Image (cartoon, rainbow, N blue to C red):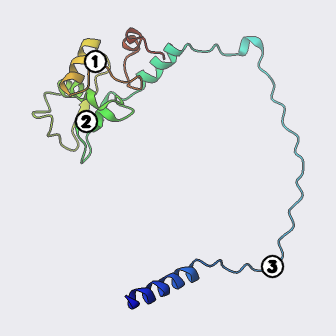
Amino acid sequence: MKRYLIFSILLLALLAAGCAKKPVDPAEPEPPEPEVAQPEPEIPEPAEEEKPEPMDKRALYEEVYNALPTSHTVEKGECLWWIAEYNEIYNDPFMWPLIYKDNRDQIDNPDLIYPDQVFSIPRDFEKNELTESRREAGAPQPYLPDEGARLPAELREDLGWSF
């Protein structure tokens, strides 16, 4: 018991010595350089006819959605679940059956995919295809994804989601 007490005291002393603050150099700090006021450049406001019209939210969403990749090359360690979960794919792992069904010619078993396989990513699908694939993947009812999922604009509109 006495050994443990001595050992504890030595350990605490070592920790206290190791945590001590380092001495500060008494060197004089350099004086700050005076700031020279720079005049702000004038930005001319565009004329009324030059202002671009704001895109409506649906058109902006469709533009972003159409720019998403339509194929994916499998890397080592990936599975269909992870691929579907990528933000640029579907942002929803339960949508992996869509990829499987679209690439059945390359995939015999959805649990076995291989590096360097190139899968097409379906972008145009209906609500019934979406709910059926999520049901097959084991998603909770009502088999609809969160609003963050990457879906076609028409489908988002049918679901009543904002853009």
In front of the other: 3 or 82? 3
Residue depicted at x 23% and y 42%: 116
Residue depicted at x 37% and y 17%: 152
* Residue 98 visible to the viewer: yes
> Taking 126 as reference, is 1 above or below it?
below
* Residue 126 visible to the viewer: no
Whole-angstrom CA distance, mark 2 to mark 3, is: 60 Å
Q: Badge 3 is on which residue? A: 27
Residue depicted at x 48% and y 15%: 162
Q: Badge 1 is on which residue? A: 142
- The amino acid type, in three-letter code, at marker 2 is Trp
Q: Give how far across and how far down residue 109 sits, in percent.
A: 11, 35
Give the tally of numbered discs.
3
Query: Local crowd at mark 3 within 10 Å, few (<14), some, or many (≥20)?
Result: few
Does label 2 or label 3 sit earlier along the sequence? 3
Q: Give how far across and how far down residue 140 sits, in percent.
A: 26, 25
Tag 1 and tag 3, C-beta contact below 8 Å: no
Q: Quadrant of the N terminus?
A: bottom left
- The amino acid type, in three-letter code, at marker 1 is Pro
For residue 81, the mark is: 2
Element assignment for label 2 = helix
- The amino acid type, in three-letter code, at marker 3 is Ala
Q: Nearer the viewer, mark 2 or mark 1?
A: 1
Element assignment for label 3 = loop
Does label 2 or label 1 sit earlier along the sequence? 2
> Taking 91 as reference, is 21 above or below it?
below
For residue 54, the mark is: none
**Within the image, what quadrant is residue 5 found in?**
bottom left
Q: Nearer the viewer, mark 1 or mark 3?
A: 1
Whole-angstrom CA distance, mark 2 to mark 1, is: 19 Å
